[in-house]
Amino acid sequence: MLVLIGVLLVIIGFAIRLNPLIVVTVAGIVTALLGGMNPAQILDSFGTGFASSRSVTIFVAVLPVVGIIEFFGLQEQAKVLIGRLAKLTAGRVLIGYLAVRQLTAAVGLNSIGGHAQTVRPLVFPMAEGAALRRYGHVPEKISEKIKGHSAAADNVGVFFGEDVFVAVGSILLITTFVDTTYHLHLEPLQLALWAIPTAIAAFLIHGFRLLRLDKQLDKEYREYELTARIEFAGEAK
Amino acid sequence: MINVEAVYWLIGILFLAWASLIAADTTHPRRWGSSAFWGLLGLCFFYSTWVQAGTAPGWILGIAVLVLVVLASTGLLGQGKHRTSTGPERESYAKRFGNKLFIPALTLPLVTVILVLAAPVLVIGGTPLLDPKNTTLVALAIGAVAAVVVALVILKPKNPATPIFESRRILESIGWAALLPQMLTTLGILFTKAGVGTAVGTLASGLLPKGSLIAGVVVYCLGMFLFTVLMGNGFAAFPIMTAAIGWPVLVETFHGDPAIVFAIGMLVGFCGTLCTPMAANFNLVPSALLEMKNKYGVITAQAGTAIPLLAVNIGLMYFLAFH
């Protein structure tokens, strides 16, 4: 039970907004000490942990292409393109992406999307472009919200789409674990079928929230305009 | 065969290139600290190859990682003033190139997915062309390189190193957050080694009142959810919660359909993944990549879906799995 102190440290550290790198490092060292590891083993764990987790940092490889197309006005062009489609709002762009992401993941095409592959270069510029067409100017607060929801649409889509496909890691983990531990014989297809109700629920809940997102953004923009006007009036005195 | 280590070396080379650009930038406010951080990070990507192969000691890398943490958290790492194209310049470029600008952006996912799908038949002399254990990673890296080449051909920048200069701007705005996903993964490994999982499993089965089906379903699902939040992924939570409650209580005692209980149990774990910074690759990498002010903005956007979906899953399991 003592090892849970490390978990507590992470929660407290994140809650009081210390630098997450420090929080994670200290929590890791404390947990390892409580778990009976010696300093040499702990250093070794940080090393092997880094080496075996390098795949998480793969996103760095797409920065060069994102950099050059942004330099040549990708985001501006995304705004022009979306601007022609008058019915598109940020929420509707993201619902479309959610549907595509979920359906492609359900047929095993996981790698077609992702934060590095599609969200940063394509999805976010389009969603922001839609907001720009609607408001004429996108304040930072609204831009932040659209960024968060662009990444969220990708995650929700892939998480609750991929499990409908039989050959995905999580399904195979269930069958291997259950079959070897409890001597059952579960078919991956059965598991995939029972993932469908949740997949539908996920699309409905998240889609509904994205429809409401447009109204929230409208409201936030009105508030922004109001405070901007008040500030302007204050200066004019 | 294109090994995944080649991908990590490519990333290492990129970090070294950015580090030397920063070292050469006399206007950079944290010139030496920043170039030391990115340079050391790049070297770690190379050295890790031998650590992973078991031919070099891991503790040296461990020390280097701690040095990176110190550099990043003591204010020695900073952001330079990088000149990029101005708003009006970008608008005139956008007019000139139009929708051609999307071609490199689309090249990336298309090349990736085509390579992933074609990987099983891309075999030369008996060895697969792409590392079969890491097909997606290798395919993504090739997709990224292909997209840069396509961008250079279409856009013809005056300086062919433009992709490197421009990505340095994005990298510096990401800053220390670039290291965080790997540190969180390491923390997850340390948690598992120290037995955090077993402790949570014991705790959850201790909380369970005997003889109530709905209580069993709720504790199994909440356990999967909370455990995933702590460990950062449902895969770590599933075996432990299933051994503690899913199998003995829900399947053996209440005769639940194992396929339904376990399929939904795993999906409940995914709701937890949506809510935790520990799942850094899903929740913190994008906030870094999108240069968000609030590092937890993605989690905020997802929590409103994850919590109702958790409740829906509890209901689905209760009504579908037990006849």
Image (tube, coloured by chain):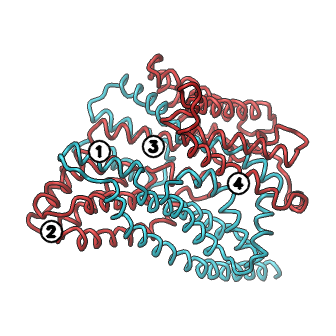
Alpha carbon distance from label 2 to label 1: 26 Å
- For label 2, the crowd category at 10 Å Cα-Cα, with few meaning under 14, some 14 to 19 and many 20 or more, is some
Q: Residue B3 appears at what percent x and percent y?
A: 56, 29
The kind of secondary structure element at disc 4 is: helix
Query: Mark 3 is on which residue type?
Result: Leu
The foreground one among B84 and B5 is B5
- For label 4, the crowd category at 10 Å Cα-Cα, with few meaning under 14, some 14 to 19 and many 20 or more, is some
Colour representing chain A: cyan
Query: Mark 4 is on which residue type?
Result: Leu
At 60% from the left and 51% from the top, the residue drawn is B288
Task: Give the quadrant of residue B256.
Answer: bottom left
Mark drawn on residue A187: none
Task: Give the quadrant of residue B175.
Answer: top right
Chain-order first, disc 3 or disc 4: 4
Question: Do the numbered discs 3 and 1 sit on residues whose CB atoms are within 8 Å?
Answer: no
Q: Is residue B153 left or right of residue A82?
A: right
The foreground one among B116 and B30 is B116
Residue B98 vertical position relative to residue B12 in the rendered view, above or below: below
Residue identifier under label 4: B106
| Chain letter for the residue marked with disc 2 in the picture | B
Indicate which label's residue lies in the foreground, 3 or 4.
4
Indicate which label's residue lies in the foreground, 2 or 1.
1
Task: Give the quadrant of residue B319.
Answer: bottom left
At 45% from the left and 50% from the top, the residue drawn is B279
Colour representing chain B: red
Q: Residue A181 appears at what percent x and percent y?
A: 20, 44
Residue identifier under label 3: B184
